[in-house]
Image (cartoon, rainbow, N blue to C red):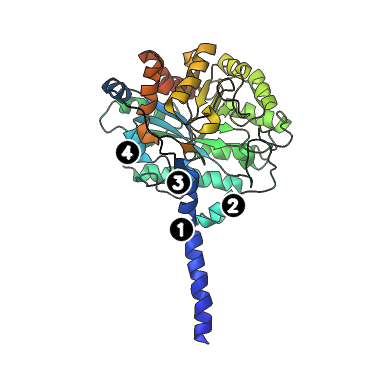
Amino acid sequence: MRKRFWIPAALAGLAALGFFGIAPGYLEGRMNKVDGQPLIAVSPEAEALHKSLLIVDLHSDTLLWQRDLTRSADRGHEDLPRLKAGNVALQVFASTTKSPKGQNYDANSADTDNITLLAIAQRQPRRTWSSLLERSLFHAEKLDAAVAKADGQLLKVTGEVSFDKLLAAHGQAHGPVGAMLSVEGLHNLEGKLENLDKLYAAGFRMAGLTHFFDNELAGSMHGMAKGGLTPFGRHVMGRMESIGMIVDIAHCSHQCVAEILATARRPVVSSHGGVQAVCKVNRNLSDAEIKGVAKTGGVIGIGYWDAAICDTSPRAIAKSIRHVRDLVGIQFVGLGSDYDGGTTVRFDTSHLVQITQALLDEGFTVDEIRAVMGGNALRLIRAGIVPLGS
């Protein structure tokens, strides 16, 4: 009798071990890849220049995964040791809370969600299993715990004081990496404007209105209806601008983007993506949209994965950057990797010198490279996180 009971119990235990212990890491290993293709040769000139840069990446999804941000990992695209190796001054960490089954660039409904199962498999608190808001608040807690554990090597940026502290410390030999929170889709408000204040209190200073499906704020480029801003979305956008949260148009439908650009009172960002002129994928920006972002004083973050640049090479990244520069000016373009966002890239964040070399090879000046690699994003962030009227 004992044997009959013991065998099913043991099998159940092994299944649980696989689900909770092995599955999350296995899944991430399959989703966040480095493609293994050859890197370009890096010159001493590029190495020296890269070490002098203030580098900002406007979007990564690292907080989604069950990893210790402070420790070097053998999977994924970034962690604190790799950020420091790549000379990153400020990383924007997105909170992604919902992802439809069969996710694609063309059309997705909001009826299903992959992240619920991931939250359970990663043994996140039960409150995150059924609440999108709680998932974002948990991501903020993860970042806070990493900051506390990092012994001064990670600094959370939430306002002018912490921003200026980061810049002042960057020239020091052991200066910290800055970390700022963003939201990938404000469906995590769960239809309540007051939840925006909860996100702000947790440290979120940037947010995109949509992700891969239409929601109660706006249409997604990958949704079913692909409509514009709803009355609730307009209300949320106005509140974001007032309190000092940067509006991100990444993943918004073309109508949503047009309506945001027409009504924006502050610079907006496209945190991660590409440009249609170089890579004709629906989520990438048209020339008219690029001009609209520039008109607000905003920044377009160029991604590193194939759907953003139709390649993964550093020279393809430089080609998209060059298009924005030639169209509207160097001051409106930056970096938006989408690291750890279910993407396959050529290099992880420890090898960002690859972009510096590619820009040099493409004839960019040193001042242009400084602007692209971080100067433009720093300008946007410093302006955007100050509440209106301050």
The nearer-to-camera label among 2 and 4 is: 2
Residue on which disc 2 sits: 116
Asked if labels 2 and 3 touch by Cβ distance under 8 angstroms, the answer is no
- How many callouts does the rendering have? 4
Q: Secondary structure at mark 1?
A: helix
* Amino acid under disc 4: Gly
The residue carrying pointer 1 sits among few (fewer than 14), some (14 to 19) or many (20 or more) residues within 10 Å by Cα, namely some
Question: Is residue 386 in view from this perspective?
Answer: no
- Reading the chain from its start, which is encountered first: label 3 or label 4? 3
Image point (50%, 85%), residue name: 2
Residue on which disc 3 sits: 142
The residue carrying pointer 2 sits among few (fewer than 14), some (14 to 19) or many (20 or more) residues within 10 Å by Cα, namely many
Q: Secondary structure at mark 2?
A: helix
Asked if labels 1 and 4 touch by Cβ distance under 8 angstroms, the answer is no
- Reading the chain from its start, which is encountered first: label 3 or label 1? 1
The nearer-to-camera label among 3 and 1 is: 1
On screen, residue 89 above or below 361: below
* Amino acid under disc 2: Thr
Asked if labels 2 and 1 touch by Cβ distance under 8 angstroms, the answer is no
* Amino acid under disc 1: Ile
Q: CA distance from mark 3 to mark 4?
A: 16 Å
Q: CA distance from mark 2 to mark 4?
A: 33 Å
Asked where in the image residue 350 lies, by quadrant, the reply is top left
In the foreground, 360 or 52: 360
Residue on which disc 1 sits: 22
The nearer-to-camera label among 4 and 1 is: 1
- Reading the chain from its start, which is encountered first: label 3 or label 2? 2
- Expressed as whole percent of the image width and height from the top left, the position of residue 62 reads 46, 42
Label disc, if present, on residue 152 of the rendered structure:
4
- Expressed as whole percent of the image width and height from the top left, the position of residue 216 reads 70, 37
- Reading the chain from its start, which is encountered first: label 1 or label 2? 1
Q: Secondary structure at mark 3?
A: helix
